[in-house]
Image (cartoon, grey):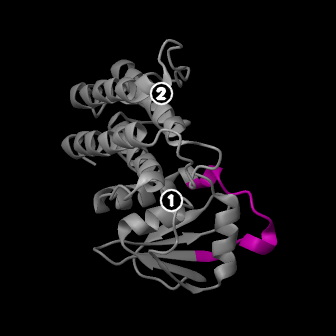
Amino acid sequence: MDRATAAGVIEEAGLALTDAGRAAPDAPVPSCPGWTVSTVVKHVGLVHTWAADMLRTYPTEPLAFPKAPPEVTPDELPDWADTQRDGLVRAVRDSDGDREMWAFGRVRPASFWWRRQAIETSIHSWDATNAVSTPFEIPASVGVAGIEELLDGLLARKFAGEPPLWGTGRTIHFHRTDGDGEWLLRIDDPPEVTLGHAKGDLAVRGPAAELLLWATNRRSSGVELFGDERLAAGWAANVRI
């Protein structure tokens, strides 16, 4: 994901999130059990603070995750989060995207964090706005990036299911219907991913954003499932993003 796209998505999604925080701070968030909209606003604000600091310093180890300033009241949280988002957007625009740094146990170009924050902000914006009114519309480009990121590395840390649910060697085919994009996931240790059309034990079809919402256990109504739906149950029980 290029710099301008990432910065624009972070701004748009982040604004929708803090608007939801002003409109209904105490609304429960179904996709984040136990959280309210204010909890989501606070979490994303802290993530933005943390990611901005990393993009300014290019660490080889993760920085300590920050805590919200104790003087920030619940009513002030959205304004505080807006400030943290502005700082992240500046860091994205000013950072050297080719410079290598820590990225979840790997060394990757700093541009990884542009994409990661666009995805994170979009998903959590959907969480909060879905709890209040019309959910944030995740751009198709973010949906594709989120699926690629999940299958590329995050998923390997998420598999914890019992063999009867997963079954080593079983496959899930993700098929995007609003543009190019097909992925075949082979459940193994580590998982294996190939691109292109293929038949899986389970097929998940839908627009890119809906595939991402399904894959992160947020919504299933926007996709079609074909094949062994026990794999879908295993996914829902064991993958938490």
Q: Report the residue at 28% width, 49% height from top.
A: 1
Q: Report the residue at 53% width, 24% height from top.
A: 61
Provide the residue designation for mark 2: 46
- Residue 4, position in %: x, y? 19, 42
- Residue 91, position in %: x, y? 28, 26
Q: Nearer the viewer, residue 156 or 224?
A: 224
Which of the labelled discs sits on residue 197, or is there none? none
Quick check: 196 left or right of 233? Answer: left
Q: Is residue 233 above or below residue 73?
A: below
Q: For the residue marked with disc 1, what is the amino acid?
A: Leu
Q: Report the residue at 44% width, 79% height from top.
A: 205
Q: Rounded to the nearest whole Å, what is the CA distance between mark 1 and mark 2?
A: 25 Å
Judged from the image, the secondary structure of the residue bearing numbered disc 2 is helix
- Residue 178, position in %: x, y? 29, 75
Regarding residue 169, the answer to whether it shows in the image is no
**What residue range appears in magenta?**
155-171
Crowd band around label 1 with a 10 angstrom C-alpha radius: few (<14), some (14–19), many (20+): some
Q: Report the residue at 30% width, 24% height from top.
A: 87
- Residue 231, position in %: x, y? 66, 75
Q: Is residue 63 above or below residue 136?
A: above
Q: Residue furthest left?
A: 4
Instruction: Determine if the magenta segment contains residue 194.
Output: no
Q: For the residue marked with disc 2, what is the amino acid?
A: Leu
Regarding residue 45, the answer to whether it shows in the image is yes
User: Of callouts 1 and 2, which one flags the residue occurring earlier in the amino acid sequence?
Assistant: 2
Q: Nearer the viewer, residue 190 or 210?
A: 210
> Which quadrant of the view contains residue 181?
bottom left
Judged from the image, the secondary structure of the residue bearing numbered disc 1 is helix
- Total residue callouts: 2
Which of the labelled discs sits on residue 151, or is there none? 1
> Which quadrant of the view contains residue 172?
bottom right
